[in-house]
Image (tube, rainbow, N blue to C red):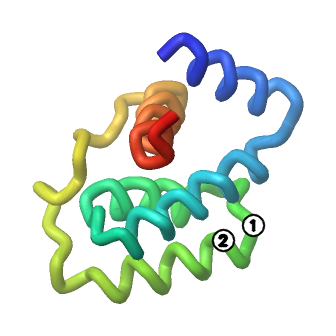
Amino acid sequence: AHQSSAACTLAQEIGRQPDLIEALAGLGELAFHEGKFPQATALLHFVAHQPQTHPQARQRSQVLLAQQSPQLTPAALPTAPAADAATAWQTMIELAQQIAHI
């Protein structure tokens, strides 16, 4: 958890949030195609709602979310919405690590 927190902090400090979001979008797409819908939903929803998200990543995320919308319920999300932005980032980084088996 410390490594992911450090990675997130570093990305934020050097202004690389769009690149980090792009990586999260890719892992969300991977999870979607592997049938890991709760994880995919959490990552893709996060990506789709970040102001720093590249337009292409936002569009890809929205398309995949729309494709699985009949299957979506609030209970499908693996974690409750975070109370603050730092916690949300931390949660998404940890989820991405699980998907990538890091």
* Mark 2 → mark 1, Cα distance in angstroms: 5 Å
- Kindly indicate the quadrant of the structure image that contains residue 43: bottom left
Q: Is residue 65 above or below residue 25?
A: below
Question: Between 43 and 30, which is closer to the camera in this rendering?
Answer: 30
Please state the horizontal and vertical placement of residue 32, each as a whole percent of the image. Answer: 38, 71
Residue at x 66%, y 71% (from the top left corner): 57
The residue identified by callout 1 is 54
90 sits to left or right of 95 = right
The residue identified by callout 2 is 57
77 sits to left or right of 67 = left
**Contact (CB < 8 A) between labels 2 and 1?**
yes
Label 1 environment density (alpha carbons within 10 Å; few <14, some 14–19, many ≥20): some
Please state the horizontal and vertical placement of residue 44, each as a whole percent of the image. Answer: 46, 63
Please state the horizontal and vertical placement of residue 10, each as a whole percent of the image. Answer: 77, 23
Residue at x 16%, y 78% (from the top left corner): 71
Q: Residue furthest top?
A: 2
Label 2 environment density (alpha carbons within 10 Å; few <14, some 14–19, many ≥20): many
Kindly state the secondary structure of the residue where label 1 is placed.
Answer: loop
Amino acid type of disc 2?
Ala
Q: Is residue 89 above or below residue 21?
A: above
- Kindly indicate the quadrant of the structure image that contains residue 15: top right
Amino acid type of disc 1?
His
Residue at x 40%, y 39% (from the top left corner): 98
Please state the horizontal and vertical placement of residue 95, each as a whole percent of the image. Answer: 41, 40
Residue at x 45%, y 40% (from the top left corner): 101
Q: Residue furthest right?
A: 14
